[in-house]
Image (tube, grey):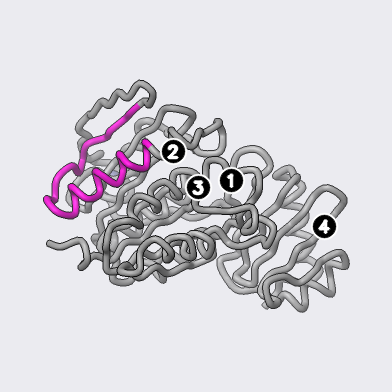
Amino acid sequence: MHLNTFNLVVIGAGALGCAVLESLGKLDFFSIRIVDGDIVSKDNLKNQTLYSEDDAKQLRYKSDAAKSALEKINSKTRFTSEHFYVGEARIDDILENADLVIDATDNVNTRLIINDACYRYKIPFIFGSLKGNKGFMYIADWKAACFNCIYRNLKLEDAEGCGVISEEAAASAGTLLVDKAIKFLTRKGGQDTFVSFSLAPLSVSEVKINRDEGCETCSVHSYKHRLENGFIQMCGNGIKFSLQRRVDLEKLAIRLKNADFKDGKTALLYKDKEKTIFISDLGDFLFSGYEKEEAKNFIDSLFSSGALVV
Ligand SMILES: [Zn+2]
């Protein structure tokens, strides 16, 4: 099979996602769909090489900025951008015609939801994770053990963002992951092998994973994973809340007095001293400088005031 017949979906355009996209973007695929609800921030420009200071100033969505950067490198692949967080309500929309899904979100809840959907639709799924100079990756296709099999037994934690990831580490991990992806697409090999690696110096170890007979996803087929009340907890201050549906920003702007419209009225930026909340019309809330409880209270207050009622 030629690469240019494949439709790829890359979820997560942070440090690892950027490295993966940069590497994939040089190859000619039929299409690459980039999915991420986050906006570019000046704090992570060093390890997210597809973005510029200008993107951060304009509060551009990472998916849009990545698409623009990749279109300058490669005119043969069709790049598309979806700027929302993936949860159970939105996963189906992005999987249409997908031949391979690459998950670089490094968020366990999101990954379990993607894993459920990929098994349900029989779409191969690669996930990668990076923490400091160490990471792992795995190719799951529906005939082999899935991410939930691994998670049930190893209780893997969210990684990216919790440790400092250098540009070099992200680039090396991205190259490793893309190399596995290409081998899988062209030769159908490498699934059910859990690859852990450490970089500088590079060492890679591989272990075969057997399907867990009690796995809710690949054995029981219950596909029950959901976002925990819409919250996607990242490390540090980066707390996201995803309603998984559109919101009426005009209505919200009346309720939130210190909020300015952005991006042709498709987003709101709310400021409270040093803290900010970026709210997209697709219903994603990006809290900066907030504790999780504080963010939850903020969302609750919007619900009780009627501002989030459809
Ligand atoms: Zn499983």
Tell me the residue that label 4 is attached to. 271
Dot 4 surroundings within 10 Å: few (below 14), some, or many (20 or more)? some
Q: Is mark 4 in CB contact (under 8 Å) with mark 2?
A: no
Question: Residue 135, image x and y in percent?
Answer: 39, 32
Q: What is the distance, in whole Å, between disc 2 and disc 3 at their CAs?
A: 10 Å
Please indicate whether residue 153 sits to the left or right of residue 307 in the image.
left
Please indicate whether residue 180 sits to the left or right of residue 252 in the image.
left
Q: Residue at x 27, y 35 (%)?
A: 194
Tell me the residue that label 3 is attached to. 49
Q: Nearer the viewer, mark 1 or mark 4?
A: 1
Label 1 or label 4, whichever comes before in sequence order: 1
Tell me which amino acid carries mark 4.
Lys
Question: Residue 307, image x and y in percent?
Answer: 76, 72
Q: Determine if residue 102 is in view.
A: yes
Q: What is the distance, in whole Å, between disc 3 and disc 1 at their CAs?
A: 6 Å
In the rendered structure, does residue 182 fall within the stretch colored magenta?
A: yes
Q: Residue at x 72, y 75 (%)?
A: 249
Tell me the residue that label 1 is attached to. 45
Q: What is the distance, in whole Å, between disc 1 and disc 4 at their CAs?
A: 23 Å
Tell me the residue that label 2 is attached to. 170
Query: Which contiguous range is marked in magenta?
Result: 172-197
Please indicate whether residue 293 sits to the left or right of residue 187 in the image.
right
